[in-house]
Image (cartoon, rainbow, N blue to C red):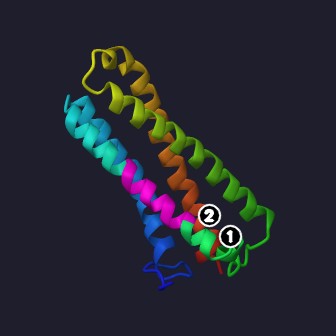
């Protein structure tokens, strides 16, 4: 795997996925702002585009993890490898991230199905609530990714 572009032990995929995780909550907030302005089509396109891009990132990272021998192989070069600190940080990153992506995927599918129907009006309050939860989850995923990335690839 080619070396990363962030100047630490990460490779191209880990660096790319990390940066995308940092961008995701900002992009989601921009999409939410479009919805608040009444630009529903723009909101939908921004959200679906972000969701698809982040799913591709997820599959890239998961593929890298699987083909390299598991998450432990990526963490092996870290002085924090095999420590409780890294294991806890990893769990605090992965569990909420998985929950966020499951909620987000459900929200995208349900909204897509109801997009042009009158049922969307009834769903709108829940859509806003779940959208806020997804944005919070993306923000947590980005924040926790900083800690995991640092411990795994940047710590000396």
Q: Secondary structure at mark 1?
A: loop
Residue at image coords 45%, 61%: 57
For mark 1, does the 10 Å Cα neighbourhood hold few (<14), some (14 to 19), or many (20 or more) residues? Answer: few
Tell whether 88 sits left or right of 124: right
Residue at image coords 37%, 56%: 53
| Residue 127 location, quadrant | top left
Number of callouts in the render? 2
Q: Is residue 26 visible?
A: no
State the image coordinates of residue 51 (x, y, percent, origin top left): 39, 48
Residue at image coords 43%, 70%: 16
Determine the main secondary structure of the stretch shown in magenta: helix
Q: Which residue is mark 1?
A: 70
Q: Secondary structure at mark 2?
A: helix
Residue at the far bottom in the pictured view: 2
Q: Is residue 5 depicted above or below 113 in this figure?
A: below
State the image coordinates of residue 91 (x, y, percent, origin top left): 69, 54
Q: Which mark is residue 148?
A: 2
| Residue 66 location, quadrant | bottom right
Mark 2 / mark 1, whichever is N-terminal: 1
Residue at image coords 33%, 16%: 119
State the image coordinates of residue 132 (x, y, percent, origin top left): 44, 33
- Distance CA(mark 2)–CA(mark 1): 15 Å
Q: Is residue 107 visible?
A: yes
Q: Which residues are magenta?
A: 51-62
Residue 121 forms part of the magenta stretch? no
Q: Which mark is residue 125?
A: none
Residue 52 forms part of the magenta stretch? yes
Q: Nearer the viewer, residue 52 or 24?
A: 52
């Amino acid at each position: 795997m080619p070396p990363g572009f962030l100047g630490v032990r990460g490779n191209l995929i880990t660096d790319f996925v990390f940066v995308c995780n940092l961008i995701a909550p900002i992009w989601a907030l921009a999409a939410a702002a479009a919805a608040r302005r009444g630009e529903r089509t723009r909101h939908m396109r921004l959200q679906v585009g972000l969701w698809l891009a982040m799913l591709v990132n997820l599959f890239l990272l998961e593929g890298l993890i699987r083909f390299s021998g598991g998450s432990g192989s990526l963490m092996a070069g870290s002085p924090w490898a095999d420590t409780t600190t890294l294991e806890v940080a990893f769990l605090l990153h992965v569990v909420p991230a998985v929950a966020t992506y499951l909620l987000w995927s459900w929200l995208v599918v349900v909204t897509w199905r109801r997009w042009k129907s009158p049922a969307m009006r009834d769903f709108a309050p829940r859509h806003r609530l779940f959208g806020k939860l997804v944005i919070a989850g993306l923000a947590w995923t980005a924040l926790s990714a900083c800690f995991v990335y640092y411990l795994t690839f940047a710590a000396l």
